[in-house]
Image (spheres, helix red, strand yellow):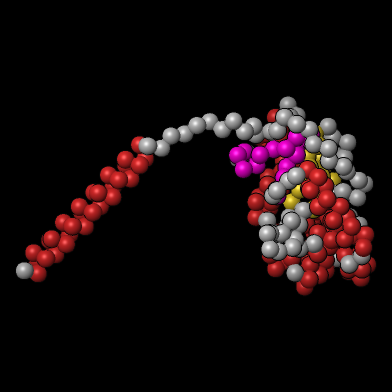
């Protein structure tokens, strides 16, 4: 009797598995795909103001101008930045990357401006890129204590750096960038522009291939 019950139970499980498989198979047959009409690179040109305090990686006079609006706490921003920075460094005479700090926050939370102000002030001591990369590497580096540890690790003049970080100049630098984002009607970051044309980073996988294609 016990073996008979186990056999019946096993049979029921098999039947249920077959029914589930058939249901999923029929659902899969009904799936259709269509090609997206959204271009990887927008047709329109954006007017993005630059100023002399914007950090630049690569050749400041390069023909290929890449602008990245990003937030240090954004995982996708880190991913896009890593690909772009690697490509720019490998083609440093032909490309330039301009970073625009974009602490947008969420629906119910304000953006965290402090890490961006701190990175801007590290840039005043010619250490923006190493500071930004260390800040992005660990979420704990985005706290006040973490930022100070990063500054110490880079051997910044921490007194003047911290005064700058809390200054109205540093705050205005970031709020001005947020105002640019509002003017461009960008809803999220990262927002990557190549020669002032927006690139859809959600669709494009190989950014390196795209960027290199512009200089061939």
Residue 54, relative to residue 1: is it above or below? Answer: above
The reply to whether residue 94 is visible in this rendering is: no
* Quadrant position of residue 168: bottom right
| Figure label count | 0
Residue at the top extreme of this rendering: 216
Q: On the picture, is 20 further left or further right than 185?
A: left
The percent position of residue 143, horizontal first and vertical second, equals 75, 69
Q: Position of residue 118 (x, y in %)?
A: 84, 62
Rendering coords of residue 117 (x, y %): 84, 61
Range of residues picked out in magenta: 189-204
For residue 28, which quarter of the picture?
Answer: top left
Indicate the position of residue 39 as horizontal and vertical percent values: 64, 32
The relative height of residue 178 versus residue 37 in the rendered view (above or below) is below
Please tell me which residue is depicted at 62% across the width and 38% down the height of the picture. Answer: 204
State whether residue 54 appears in this view. Answer: yes
Q: Which residue is pictured at 68% across the width and 59% down the height?
A: 107
Is 15 one of the magenta-colored residues? Answer: no
The residue shown at (6%, 69%) is 1
Question: Residue at horizontal 79%, vertical 67%?
Answer: 147
Looking at the image, which is closer to me, 54 or 8?
Answer: 8
> Of residues 172 and 127, which is closer to you in this image?
172
Question: Which quadrant: the C terminus?
Answer: top right
């Amino acid at each position: 009797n016990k073996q008979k019950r186990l056999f019946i139970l096993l049979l029921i499980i098999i039947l249920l598995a077959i029914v589930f498989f058939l249901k999923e198979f029929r659902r899969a047959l009904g799936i259709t795909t269509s090609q997206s009409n959204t271009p990887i690179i927008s047709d329109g040109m954006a007017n993005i103001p630059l100023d002399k305090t914007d950090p630049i990686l690569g050749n400041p006079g390069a023909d290929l101008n890449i602008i990245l609006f990003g937030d240090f706490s954004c995982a996708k921003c880190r991913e896009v930045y890593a690909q772009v920075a690697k490509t720019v460094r490998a083609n440093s005479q032909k490309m330039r990357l301009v970073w625009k700090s974009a602490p947008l926050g969420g629906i119910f939370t304000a953006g965290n401006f402090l890490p961006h102000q701190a990175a801007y002030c590290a840039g005043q001591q010619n250490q923006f890129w190493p500071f930004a990369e260390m800040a992005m590497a660990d979420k704990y580096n985005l706290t006040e204590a973490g930022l100070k540890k990063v500054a110490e690790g880079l051997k910044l003049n921490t007194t003047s750096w911290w005064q700058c970080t809390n200054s109205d100049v540093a705050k205005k630098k970031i709020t001005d960038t947020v105002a640019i984002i509002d003017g461009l009607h960008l809803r999220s970051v990262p927002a990557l522009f190549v020669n002032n044309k927006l690139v859809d980073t959600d669709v494009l996988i190989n950014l390196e291939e795209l960027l290199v294609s512009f200089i061939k």
